[in-house]
């Protein structure tokens, strides 16, 4: 699955040791860009996300898997990212006009002025 969302918050790095060795996990809170935005906690596991600069307010495209597991009769759901890419937002350059050309442009004609009035109306 994939979503594009704005980073709201980066939670503290978590680490520990399990049966498979040491682990590291970084949780981030993102907000979707839908009509009714939703906040989602996404987990970044391991060190493969160290190259991504996470800045609150920036947009990111996140590829992820959703996984649920049962523990003591309760179900827990994780959103685990496997790729995070920063969205590049290129702002359009403002349109500039040479200052000298402003004096050369004649004002538009007013179609309702008396100068353009036609006298041959049949009524």
Image: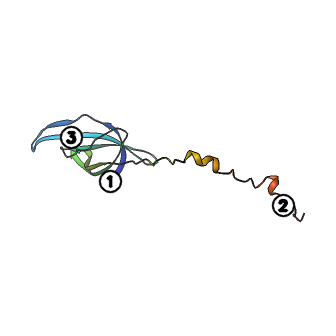
| Element under disc 1 | strand
Compared to residue 114, the image places residue 49 above or below, namely above
Given residues 21 and 120, the one toward you in this image is 120
According to the picture, the residue beneath numbered tag 1 turns out to be 2
Q: Label 3: few (<14), some or many (≥20) within 10 Å?
A: some
> Residue 102 bears which disc, if any?
none
- First in residue order: circle 3 vs circle 1: 1
Compared to residue 46, the image places residue 122 above or below, namely below
- First in residue order: circle 3 vs circle 2: 3
Quadrant in which the N terminus is drawn: bottom left
Q: Is residue 74 visible?
A: no
Image position, residue 101 (x, y; %): 59, 49
Image position, residue 25 (x, y; %): 21, 40
| Element under disc 2 | loop
Q: Label 1: few (<14), some or many (≥20) within 10 Å?
A: few
Disc number lying in front (1 or 2):
2
Q: CA distance from mark 3 to mark 2?
A: 79 Å
According to the picture, the residue beneath numbered tag 2 turns out to be 118
- First in residue order: circle 1 vs circle 2: 1
Q: Farthest residue toward the top?
A: 12
For residue 116, what is the image quadrant? bottom right
Q: CA distance from mark 1 to mark 2?
A: 64 Å
| Element under disc 3 | strand
Residue pictured at 18% horizontal, 43% vertical: 47
Image position, residue 49 (x, y; %): 22, 45
Q: Farthest residue toward the right?
A: 123
Dot 3 and dot 2 residues touching (CB under 8 Å): no
Residue pictured at 45% horizontal, 46% vertical: 36
Image position, residue 97 (x, y; %): 54, 48
Residue pictured at 81% horizontal, 54% vertical: 115
According to the picture, the residue beneath numbered tag 3 turns out to be 25
Given residues 11 and 99, the one toward you in this image is 99
């Amino acid at each position: 699955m994939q979503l594009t969302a704005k980073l709201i918050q980066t939670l503290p790095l978590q680490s520990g040791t399990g049966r498979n060795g040491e682990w590291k996990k970084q949780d981030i809170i993102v907000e979707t860009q839908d009509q009714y935005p939703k906040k989602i906690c996404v987990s970044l596991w391991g060190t493969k996300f160290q190259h991504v600069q996470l800045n609150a307010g920036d947009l990111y495209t996140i590829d992820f898997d959703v996984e649920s597991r049962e523990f003591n009769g309760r179900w827990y759901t994780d959103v685990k990212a496997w790729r995070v890419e920063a969205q590049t937002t290129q702002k359009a350059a403002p349109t500039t006009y040479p200052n000298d050309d402003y004096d050369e442009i004649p004002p538009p004609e007013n179609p309702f002025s008396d100068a353009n009035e036609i006298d041959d109306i049949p009524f």
